Image (tube, rainbow, N blue to C red):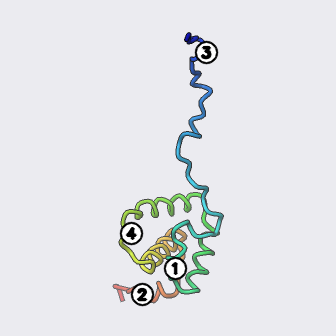
C-alpha cells in the first residue's frame, strides 16, 4: 500500500471552525421572556407580567446587554431560588435597567429624610 503525501495534506483555510464550536441559541424575540425564566415570570402578578413584556420590548441594545450581564452573573445562585424569588429579582433588575418602577415598588420605598 502506498500513500501519496501530497493528497493527504490539509488546508486549514478549508476547515470551517464555526461548525466545530458550540453554537449559542438565538436570542429570544424582542419583548419575549428569556429562555428558562418563563415559569419565574409566570409567578408574578398579571400586572407585573404585562410590565415585563412592555419593558422587554422597549429595551435598547445597551439595556439588552446589561440585562444579559445581570442574568449571567446570577446564573449560579438561580438554582437555589424559587420561581417567585427569581421572578421578583428579574422584575426588579428589569425595572432598574429600564428606569421604570411599579406602583408597588414605590410603596415599599422608605423616605429616610421625612
CA distance separating discs 1 and 3: 66 Å
Name the residue: 61% across, 63% down: 28
Q: Which residue is mark 1?
A: 101
Query: Secondary structure beneath disc 2?
Result: loop
CA distance separating discs 2 and 1: 11 Å
Tell me if residue 37 comes above or below residue 108 in the rendering.
Answer: above
Q: Residue 105: percent from the left, percent from the top?
A: 47, 84
Query: Secondary structure beneath disc 1?
Result: loop
Discs 3/4, front? 3
Q: Which residue is mark 4?
A: 79
Query: Secondary structure beneath disc 4?
Result: loop
Tell me if residue 108 comes above or below residue 62 in the rendering.
Answer: below
Q: Which residue is mark 2?
A: 108
Q: Which residue is mark 3?
A: 7
Q: Nearer the viewer, residue 86 or 59?
A: 86
CA distance separating discs 3 and 2: 73 Å
CA distance separating discs 3 and 4: 52 Å
Amino acid at each position: 500500500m502506498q500513500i501519496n503525501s501530497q493528497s493527504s495534506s490539509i488546508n486549514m483555510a478549508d476547515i470551517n471552525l464555526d461548525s466545530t464550536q458550540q453554537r449559542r441559541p438565538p436570542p429570544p424575540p424582542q419583548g419575549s421572556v428569556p429562555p428558562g425564566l418563563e415559569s419565574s415570570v409566570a409567578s408574578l402578578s398579571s400586572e407585573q407580567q404585562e410590565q415585563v413584556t412592555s419593558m422587554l420590548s422597549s429595551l435598547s441594545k445597551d439595556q439588552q446587554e446589561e440585562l444579559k450581564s445581570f442574568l449571567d452573573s446570577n446564573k449560579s445562585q438561580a438554582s437555589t431560588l424559587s420561581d417567585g424569588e427569581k421572578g421578583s429579582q428579574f422584575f426588579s433588575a428589569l425595572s432598574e435597567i429600564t428606569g421604570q418602577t411599579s406602583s408597588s415598588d414605590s410603596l415599599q420605598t422608605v423616605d429616610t429624610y421625612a
